[in-house]
Image: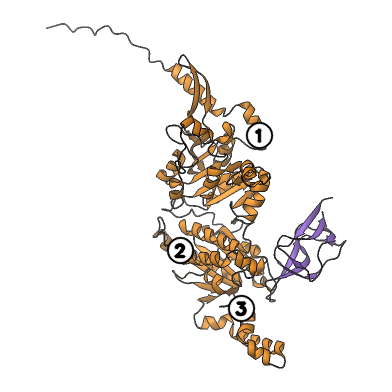
């Protein structure tokens, strides 16, 4: 029997990766250092926070997992890295109120957040961060702070790229899949400005952010207009006048909180329902003041925001685009914890008449709620479309009919609560013709194809003119019509499904919204697209 | 002392002026009423202050965003 042989005498090599690990750590530190202390100080002096401070502010503490921290350009000699300049875009996965989101933003301290592309784009338009939102079906937050491409890239490449090479395909796809929030944190022009619009909700910051197709130097050269960037694309223009961006925050901190709050109303994607929030506000709460909030004098307006706040869960509203198209109020809210979208005519602005701006706002909000399976409540007090030369020139009819068209395509439950006037095509846009057609009215309600005043003077023009006292005759006819305009007579014909005491509104709506969950949870997924919008 | 401009929310005409120059306006009180789209739209001074100037008179046509009055706050 052979004696067992000894194992060959091998040398064990040291498995020491410390140099590589040290390099990894060093590269991470360079990446965290952004564009360097000097650039960061300049950025702070302009009252702007860095991308990393923004990520920290928007996300739950310590929840950020970065992807692509090592992208950038290094300066090397003899295989050793001397210096590293990170890519001007930071992105990854983080949590907002305990739920994951894909998030990214330009780093202005590196070359002004210029568009950057290595083997793969990180974000901005398309890129990893948008792929992450799409593939994981989680919301996307874009923190925009860059002016997009630079003409210098043409020299680098040696040729000129065709528009759309870094296209919006994924950005567009996401709008039907997951909530997309775009926050304009600095000056956005060109591609990044366009990207901001491809969102469910957008926000910018007063005084420190601006958004435009092209900035002052291009405007000066093309049109000879000398204008500051704030006058060209500050919030006074982009939010209040144009409605290019939905909301404005007073400062960065408020902006971060608004992003977190907006997402709290949203599901993670279109394949699930929005989360049910706090249910401590009793659904049967009755507010006595609702009984008298509508003035008997039909010419007197009232505060619709107050009416809404008495019906929805306390402190649960988040108004979308409050400074634009103000004759309609669009606000997210909760009813016994369930997320709802409220659309309410504002009698303080043109008696609640729908103009082109408010119609545009309503169209977007209706689509937002339908996409994420959020039931809609209309508080209706609308005399019709806005009239007059300015309104016609602004294409009120077209924008108004677009909102009617979109209203007729959607499939979320709609609750129409007529609190006062409901007239014409604008009134038509507030009802659910594809579903239950469930219309609830307060005793103060009135409706028709057009208001009695204008209708009588037009239809009885000759009779009124021929009467000995035309004014008196007009009033007599109007009185006769008003008597048959009582909402109770329509209720007798089941032309309106219920008339309720205003104080019962919350309890009544909560009951039906909670029951609608069986419909909503069996109708999840992306919403179909229809033909051509008017 | 800061001067705040009260603007018209709507296009319409000045129906009634309900405050006088020099009046101390309580927060939420109206200065005047604009008639627009057959409605009486109050021009509300949300923060209150002293009415220092009226820039329109009853019967005037006003445009959306037009300054109507000045309030010292």
- The disc placed on residue A410 is 2
Tell me which numbered mark, 1 or 2, is placed earlier along the sequence: 1
Crowding at mark 3 (Cα within 10 Å: few <14, some 14-19, many 20+):
some
**Dot 1 lies on which element?**
helix
The crowd level at tag 1 (other Cα within 10 Å; few <14, some 14-19, many 20+) is few
Can you identify the residue that label 1 sits on?
Answer: A44
Q: Is mark 3 on a helix, strand or loop?
A: loop
Residue B42 in picture, x, y percent from top left: 74, 67
Q: Specify whether disc 3 shares its chain with disc 1.
A: yes
Q: In the image shown, does A124 or A34 lie closer to the viewer?
A: A124
As drawn, the label of residue A59 is: none
Whether residue A40 appears in this view of the structure is: yes
Residue at x-position 46% and y-position 67%: A408
Q: Colour of chain A?
A: orange
Q: Mark 3 lies on which chain?
A: A
Give the mark, 3 or 2, whose residue is nearer the N terminus.
2
Q: Residue furthest left?
A: A1
Chain coloured purple in this rendering? B
Q: Where is residue A418 shown, x and y percent of the image?
A: 57, 72
Q: Report how far apart the C-alphas of labels 3 and 2 lie in the structure.
A: 28 Å
Q: Quadrant of the N terminus of chain A?
A: top left
Q: What residue is drawn where x is 49% and y is 30%? A: A156
What element does badge 2 sit on? loop
Q: Which of marks 3 and 1 is nearer the N terminus?
A: 1
Q: Name the residue under label 3.
A: A451
Q: In this view, does A19 lie above or below A522?
A: above
* Tag 3 near tag 1, CB within 8 Å: no
Q: In this view, does A190 lie to the left or right of A176?
A: right
Q: Determine the chain carrying the residue at label 2.
A: A
């Amino acid at each position: 029997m052979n004696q067992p042989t000894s194992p060959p005498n091998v040398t064990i090599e040291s498995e020491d990766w410390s140099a590589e690990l040290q390099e990894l750590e060093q590269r991470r530190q360079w990446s965290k250092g952004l564009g360097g202390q000097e650039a960061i100080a300049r950025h702070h002096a302009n009252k702007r926070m860095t991308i990393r401070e923004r990520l920290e502010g928007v996300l739950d503490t310590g929840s950020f997992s970065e992807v692509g921290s090592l992208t950038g350009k290094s300066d090397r000699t003899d295989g050793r890295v001397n210096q590293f300049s990170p890519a001007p875009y930071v992105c990854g996965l983080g949590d907002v109120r305990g739920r994951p989101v894909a998030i990214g933003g330009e780093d202005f301290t590196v070359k002004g957040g210029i568009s950057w592309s290595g083997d793969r784009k990180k974000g901005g338009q398309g890129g990893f961060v948008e792929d992450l939102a799409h593939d994981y079906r989680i919301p996307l937050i874009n923190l925009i702070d860059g002016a997009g491409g630079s003409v210098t890239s043409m020299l680098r490449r040696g040729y000129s790229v065709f528009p759309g090479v870094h296209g919006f395909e994924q950005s567009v796809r996401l709008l039907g899949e997951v909530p997309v929030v775009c926050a304009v944190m600095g000056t956005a022009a060109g591609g990044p400005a366009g990207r901001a619009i491809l969102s469910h909700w957008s926000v910018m910051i007063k005084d420190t952010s601006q958004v435009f197709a092209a900035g002052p130097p291009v405007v000066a050269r093309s049109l000879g207009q000398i204008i500051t960037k704030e006058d060209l694309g500050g919030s006074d223009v982009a939010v209040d006048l144009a409605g290019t961006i939905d909301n404005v925050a007073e400062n960065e901190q408020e902006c971060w909180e608004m992003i977190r709050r907006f997402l709290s109303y949203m599901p993670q994607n279109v394949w699930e329902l929005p989360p049910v929030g706090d249910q401590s506000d009793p659904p049967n709460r009755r507010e006595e003041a609702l009984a008298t909030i509508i003035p008997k004098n039909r010419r007197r307006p009232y505060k619709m925001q107050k009416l809404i706040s008495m019906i929805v869960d306390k402190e649960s509203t988040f108004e979308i685009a409050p400074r634009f198209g103000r004759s309609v109020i669009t606000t997210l809210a909760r009813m016994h914890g369930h997320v709802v979208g409220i659309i309410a005519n504002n009698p303080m602005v043109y008696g609640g008449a729908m103009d082109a701006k408010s119609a545009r706002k309503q169209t977007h909000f209706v689509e937002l709620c339908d996409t994420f399976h959020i039931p809609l409540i209309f508080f209706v007090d609308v005399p019709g479309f806005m009239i007059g030369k300015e309104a016609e020139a602004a294409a009120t009819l077209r924008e108004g009919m677009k909102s009617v068209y979109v209203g007729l395509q959607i499939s979320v439950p709609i609750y129409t609560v007529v609190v006062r006037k409901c007239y014409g095509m604008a009134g038509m846009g507030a009802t659910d013709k594809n579903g239950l057609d469930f219309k609830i009215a307060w005793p103060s309600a009135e409706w028709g194809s057009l208001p009695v005043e204008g209708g009588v003077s037009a239809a009885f023009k000759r009779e009124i003119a021929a009467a000995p006292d035309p004014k008196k005759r007009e009033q007599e006819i109007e009185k006769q019509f008003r008597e048959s305009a009582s909402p109770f007579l329509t209720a007798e014909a089941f032309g309106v499904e219920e008339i309720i005491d205003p104080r019962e509104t919350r309890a009544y709506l909560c009951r039906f919204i909670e029951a609608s969950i069986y419909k909503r949870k069996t109708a999840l997924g992306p919403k179909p697209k229809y033909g051509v919008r008017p | 002392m800061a001067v705040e401009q009260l603007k018209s929310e709507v296009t319409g005409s000045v129906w009634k002026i309900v405050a006088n120059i020099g009046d101390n306006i309580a927060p939420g009180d109206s200065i005047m009423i604009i008639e627009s789209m057959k409605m009486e739209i109050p021009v509300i001074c949300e923060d209150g202050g002293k009415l220092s100037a009226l820039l329109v008179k009853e019967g005037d046509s006003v445009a959306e965003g037009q300054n109507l009055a000045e309030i010292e706050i």
